[in-house]
Each structure stands twice: as structure tokens, then as C-alpha cells.
Image: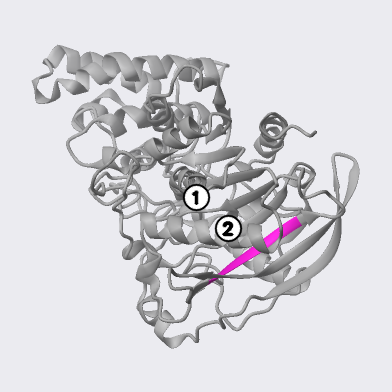
């Protein structure tokens, strides 16, 4: 995730960009956050590695592997130490580095560590949750992960500077890393350092980002390839590639969210004569959203009353909301209102990261949910399990506080981005163009877009729009694929979806980095 509590007040659209907590999880900064860096001693400018030996059973095969928890020192243009970057790597024992893929994984925020992907997705061990119900308090259960990707690729989970155990060092401060382009530079240097230290320059290489991590990946793959490090593949999970459409006055977000609303209404049995086939139903909703609905919104306040009634009636049939509520919202229901309204008659709210989750508010008459049950329902399990795992199984210890998320990062983020074809920085991040440039300059680069139907943080229909507007030549369009799952922002919270995701990723790796 994760998933950050966005500056958009959990679903309203304003100039401030959306950021999911965990994978985008960035809660509001506390007073303690503001002074944490000043009070906390900086880590030494030396690299640390702790290696432990393990074995895993994946698809009936026993694999021996080494887990390495440690730090990488990245340097500025004057070769001065600038940051200590924490990572955990899982490498298959005895594999030839020249043929063995290596994948760099990270969450987003901005302000999130990689704990969410690390403990939930493809590492050899994962946390068991009660998803989509709230997971209870400790003791938690770490279980062997039969859906680990270790049978296909080595895995390197990386924490952004300021999150996890990663910190600025020397004369550097957070502002040197907390921005779209600053972050890309830091990750590029960290990956180059890992590749050099571990002799992986000739290995097939992949990036795997979740949420804002997809924003990072789209720009990062282009930046690294411009420096001579070509990539085999990029996996985009729960993407956000264009923050510009969130500026007030545009209807793209209203259109883009509609299929996600329909998916949630379908899941919670709010669709009259509910169709059995979710995919077919959503195809129908997509066509209506990009056709009659988009045309109606384009007329703005000039839409005739009869058309307002017709659009509201059809939208009600697709979303489970009343036509009157939709008309009262001017045909534009923001995600936060939808999460409060759909199950209001049951006094329940929906999750933002995953609309399968439900919770209760102080009252049923409010305008917006008080919290996100898909965030609070799993955070304690992930954070506690990671601390226990790092201590007891990876034998890694630090005097620093591990920051699952760090609110100061998101609060002070520089959203400007120097895109490949822009003469001056864009005021908000748009990185689909960076990804397109990377695909044109490396025509063998494969991209897989991974989407959850019930994700209200980064809706799949907006992702489809962004990736359909990269102006790719027909010869390159086959390098871009989409897959969908009955889950939310953190697709892996649904064990069945994780199993299907592993199967799809295995096919992707076989295609992008065939074994010789």
C-alpha cells in the first residue's frame, strides 16, 4: 500500500495529490514527526549487512535462499555520503547471477516504507490476516508463502529515504529526497549501488511499485535506462500516473471512479438484478461512463433537466445509490461520499484502499467516513509482524525507530517533475510520458498493469485511461498488458487473488526474461 492518507481528505479532489497510506500510507504529521530527525542520531556512513540462511517450499519445490538485511550508502555528485538506504534482499542460493532475474520492490506514499509489500505479497514469509474483516490483535501469524516469487526472481525490498530505517546522513536533509525527481534520483543511486556491490549488472532486472511506487517506477525506469541500465520489465500495482487530472474543474476523476463504484455496489449486493459476471458488468459500465456519462458531464451546468434525470437514473442502477442523491451531488459523487452513502442504511462505511472492508462511524448521518477500515483493519498486524520477523528470523537490529510511514515526507513533498519532453518542470507529477519514453527507447521493455476492482485509492479505469494515452506505436502496444483481481489496493490481501496474481506474474517473468 500502501497507501497514504491523502491530502485529498480521503477522496475529495483538490490541488493536493492523492496519496494512499502504507502503500501510500501517510498519516498527518505529528509534532513528534516534526522533530524526529533532529532528535534522532543519524546512522553511520558505513554499509551494514546481516545474512541468514533459509529454505522455502514453493509449488512443491524446496528452495534454499539467503536473506540479507542491510543498508546501502548513496552519495552526492561530490562523492559525499548522502543517505543510508535500508533494504531486505532474498536471493536464491547457487543461481547464476547472469541468468537470475532481480526485482526491486517498494511501496509509495510518499512516505511509506516497503513493509506492506514485504509482509503481504511475495517474500518467502507473509502475514496472515482476516481480510476483508479486521485482523485481531497479537499474537499474529507469519506463514510460509507458497505464492512467493522467489522461484522466478530474487527480491529486494527497498525503503524510501526517511521511511523504514532509511535516513539522510552527512549534511543531507529530508528535502534532498522528498520530491518526485529527488526521490527518483535517490532510488536510482540505491539500485545502482546494490547492483554494483552484488555483481548483478548482467542480471535481468525488474521494478515492482505499488501506489505512489508506480509513479516512482514510471520515472525511475526511464532515468535508469538513460544512465545505461536497461530493464526487462516493470510491474505497476494500483497505479497513479497523472496527478494533474485531480485539479478542480475537470471531470476525468468522476468518470474514472464510476466502474469502481459499480464494482463495490456489485460486491455488496446493491445492484438490482445483480449480474453473475462482474467482468461483463464492468465492461458495460466502462462503456457508459466513457460515453453517455462523459458527454453529459461535458455540458456542465447546461445539461438539460431531462438528461440530468436520465443520467441519474442509469447511474443509480450501476452504483446502488439513489437517483435523488446523485442529482443532489450534481451527478458527481466523490469517493468519500460514496463510501459513506452506499451502506448508510446498514450504518456501515466502506474501505478506501479496499471497498470489501466495512466499518462503523459514530453516526450514520455524516458526510464522510471517519476513517478507512481497510487501513486500520490490517496495519497493526503488518507492523507488529514485521518487527518480530526482523528481530527473530532475520537477526537485524537497529537503534533507529522503524517508520512504517512518515507523515513529514508527504507534508513536505515537492510535486514538480521534469518530464522527458518538457522544457520546464510540470507543477504536478505526470509520469506516463516517462514510461512511454522508456518503452520507445527500449522496445523490449515489458509492462504489466496489475489492478484491484475494489480499489478506491487508485481506480483501475483511470489507470487504463493514462496508459492508453502514451501514444505508443502499434509495434509496442503488445508490450503493455493489464490484469484484474477481486481485491483492493493491496491485491495480496485476498489470498485467492494473490494466488492468481502469482500465476500471472510467473507468465510475465517467463516472457520478459526467458531462461536461456
On screen, residue 287 versus residue 129, left or right, reads left
Q: Position of residue 224 (x, y in %)?
A: 51, 49
Magenta stretch in the rendered image:
84-90
Q: Which residue is mark 2?
A: 192
Pointer 1 or 2: first along the chain: 2
Q: Position of residue 461 (x, y in %)?
A: 42, 28
Q: Position of residue 162 (x, y in %)?
A: 47, 69
Tell me the number on the disc at residue 227. Answer: 1
- Image quarter of residue 422: top left
Disc 1 vs disc 2: Cβ atoms closer than 8 Å?
yes
Is residue 359 shown to the viewer in this render?
Answer: no
Quadrant location of the C terminus? Answer: top right
Disc 1 secondary structure class: loop
Mark 2 surroundings within 10 Å by alpha-carbon count, few (fewer than 14), some (14 through 19), many (20 or more): some
Is residue 310 shown to the viewer in this render?
Answer: yes
- Nearest to viewer (mark 1 / mark 2): 1
Residue at the location (35% across, 15% down)? 288
On screen, residue 456 versus residue 158, left or right, reads left
In this rendering, the answer to whether 189 lies above or below 401 is above
In reply to whether residue 284 is colored magenta, the answer given is no
In this rendering, the answer to whether 123 lies above or below 269 is below
Relative depth, front residue between 474 and 38 = 474
On screen, residue 412 versus residue 148, left or right, reads left
Q: Gap in Å between the C-alphas at discs 1 and 2?
A: 10 Å
Amino acid at each position: 500500500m500502501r497507501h497514504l492518507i491523502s491530502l485529498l481528505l480521503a477522496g475529495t479532489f483538490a490541488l493536493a495529490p492523492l496519496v494512499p497510506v502504507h502503500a501510500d500510507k501517510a498519516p498527518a504529521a505529528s509534532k513528534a514527526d516534526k522533530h524526529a530527525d533532529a532528535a534522532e542520531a543519524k546512522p553511520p556512513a558505513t554499509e551494514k549487512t546481516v545474512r541468514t540462511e533459509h529454505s522455502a517450499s514453493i509449488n512443491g519445490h524446496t528452495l534454499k535462499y539467503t536473506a540479507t538485511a542491510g543498508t546501502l550508502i548513496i552519495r552526492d555528485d561530490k562523492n559525499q555520503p548522502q543517505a543510508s538506504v535500508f533494504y531486505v534482499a532474498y536471493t536464491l542460493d547457487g543461481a547464476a547471477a547472469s541468468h537470475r532475474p532481480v526485482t526491486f520492490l517498494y511501496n509509495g506514499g510518499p512516505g511509506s516504507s516497503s513493509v506492506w509489500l514485504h509482509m503481504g505479497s511475495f517474500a518467502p514469509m507473509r502475514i496472515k490476516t482476516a481480510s476483508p474483516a479486521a485482523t485481531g490483535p497479537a499474537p499474529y501469524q507469519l506463514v510460509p508463502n507458497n505464492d512467493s516469487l522467489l522461484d522466478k526472481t530474487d527480491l529486494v525490498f527497498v525503503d524510501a529515504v526517511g521511511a523504514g530505517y532509511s535516513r539522510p546522513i552527512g549534511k543531507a536533509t529530508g528535502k534532498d529526497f522528498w520530491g518526485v525527481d529527488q526521490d527518483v534520483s535517490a532510488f536510482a543511486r540505491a539500485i545502482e549501488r546494490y547492483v554494483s556491490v552484488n555483481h548483478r549488472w548482467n542480471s535481468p532486472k525488474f521494478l515492482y511499485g505499488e501506489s505512489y511506487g508506480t509513479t516512482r517506477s514510471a520515472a525511475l525506469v526511464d532515468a535508469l535506462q538513460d544512465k545505461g541500465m536497461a530493464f526487462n520489465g516493470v510491474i505497476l500495482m494500483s497505479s497513479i500516473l497523472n496527478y494533474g487530472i485531480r485539479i478542480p474543474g475537470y471531470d476525468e476523476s468522476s468518470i474514472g471512479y464510476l466502474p469502481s463504484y459499480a464494482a463495490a455496489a456489485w460486491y455488496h449486493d446493491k445492484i438490482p438484478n445483480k449480474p453473475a459476471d462482474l467482468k461483463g458488468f464492468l465492461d458495460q459500465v466502462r462503456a457508459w461512463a466513457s460515453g453517455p456519462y462523459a458527454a453529459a458531464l461535458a455540458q456542465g451546468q447546461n445539461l438539460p433537466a431531462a438528461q440530468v434525470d436520465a443520467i441519474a437514473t442509469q447511474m443509480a442502477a450501476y452504483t446502488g445509490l439513489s437517483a435523488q442523491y446523485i442529482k443532489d451531488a450534481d451527478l458527481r459523487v466523490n469517493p468519500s461520499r460514496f463510501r459513506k452513502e452506499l451502506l448508510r442504511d446498514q450504518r456501515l462505511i466502506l474501505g478506501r484502499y479496499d471497498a470489501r472492508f466495512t466499518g462503523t462511524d459514530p453516526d450514520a448521518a455524516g458526510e464522510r467516513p471517519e476513517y478507512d477500515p481497510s487501513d486500520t483493519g490490517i496495519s497493526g498486524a503488518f507492523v507488529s509482524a514485521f518487527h518480530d520477523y526482523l528481530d527473530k528470523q532475520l537477526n537485524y537490529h537497529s537503534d533507529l525507530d522503524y517508520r512504517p510511514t512518515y507523515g513529514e515526507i508527504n507534508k513536505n513533498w515537492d510535486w514538480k517533475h521534469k518530464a522527458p519532453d518538457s522544457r520546464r518542470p510540470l507543477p504536478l507529477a505526470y509520469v506516463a510520458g516517462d514510461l512511454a519514453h522508456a518503452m520507445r527507447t527500449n522496445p523490449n521493455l515489458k509492462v504489466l498493469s496489475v489492478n484491484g476492482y475494489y480499489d478506491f485509492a487508485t481506480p483501475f479505469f483511470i489507470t487504463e485511461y493514462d496508459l492508453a494515452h502514451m501514444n505508443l506505436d502499434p509495434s509496442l502496444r503488445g508490450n503493455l498488458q493489464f490484469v484484474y483481481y477481486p481485491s483492493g489496493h493491496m491485491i495480496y490481501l485476498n489470498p485467492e487473488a494473490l494466488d492468481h496474481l502469482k500465476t500471472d506474474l510467473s507468465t510475465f517473468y517467463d516472457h520478459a526474461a526467458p531462461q536461456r
